[in-house]
Amino acid sequence: MLAIKNNIMAANAARHLGSSYDKLAQSVERLSSGLRINGAKDDAAGMAVRELMRADIAVLQQGARNAMDGISMLQTFEGAMGTIDEALVRMKQLAEQAATGSYSGEQRTIMNNEFAEMAEEIKRIANATTFNGNELLNNSAASIAIQFGAADTDVVNVDGCDVTSSALGLSTASIGTVQAAQSALGTVAAAITTKDTARAAFGYKMNRLESTISVINNQTENLMAAESRISDVDVATEMAAMTRTQVLAQAGVSMLAQANTVPQMALSLLR
């Protein structure tokens, strides 16, 4: 029907044009952000799943960093144990040297002084070695939990040890005489065994944490891939949709212009 008051064709063209512009704006937003879901209205269920995945990914990534920090801590203490090891080796060498009767009392006194200095150095290292205020070389009751996941079981407990000279029985050891030196040999050997046990524990804790990091990184990668499939925009598909929408928008503008000329046709009849 040819009418002047209501231009139904123009209203219809304007409605379709508005819809095309809305879709075009959505495509531009998706392509500029790289995300298929930019708000809850885009995909409410998908957004909920995505946010849960993002939280899990963040926890896993922080867990990997926690494990790496744990390895750094263990490397610090294990490195100190390496220095203690060198001191113990030197002490055993001195005890072996003093245990023979071919040295004079004065010479043996010099050996004993060095032996005592090595014991003091072991004590100093055990008490001075810390990591962020944590001490593990002078307290066998100490325990540090390395958390790498959300569950209570996602934990590696690192137990402390006591490798001070007094705990190793070295503070009272002496090599001032042949008999004392022979006795000190057994004391130092036992100290080395105690130290090796504690150092080995740090070693296999590091190996365990390295394996944990590998597993966590694999889990993180898979979760990120899943989150990407839910959240990221498919550029090829979206570009095709955008091109189609642009054509529709251009056609809508053209048809709206044509529809706006219809009332002029009715006016021509009135003349």
Image: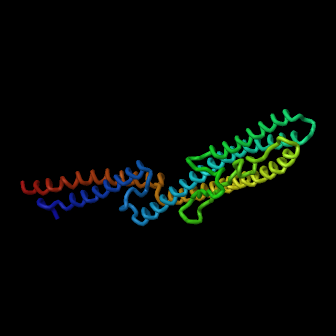
The mark tally for this picture is 0
What residue sits 81% from the left and 36% below the top?
109
- In the displayed structure, 53 sits above or below 138; it is below
| Residue farthest along the left direction in this orientation | 271
Nearest the viewer among 183 and 29 is: 183
Nearest the viewer among 68 and 99 is: 99
- In the displayed structure, 60 sits above or below 32; it is below
User: Horizontally, is 8 left or right of 176 in the view?
Assistant: left
- In the displayed structure, 115 sits above or below 211; it is above
Query: Residue 118's spot in the image, x, y percent?
Result: 74, 40
User: Horizontally, is 259 left or right of 193 in the view?
Assistant: left
Query: Residue 236's spot in the image, x, y percent?
Result: 48, 52
User: Horizontally, is 115 left or right of 65 in the view?
Assistant: right
The quarter in which the C terminus is drawn is bottom left
What residue sits 68% from the left and 45% below the top?
123
Nearest the viewer among 74 and 47 is: 74
Query: Residue 223's spot in the image, x, y percent?
Result: 55, 59
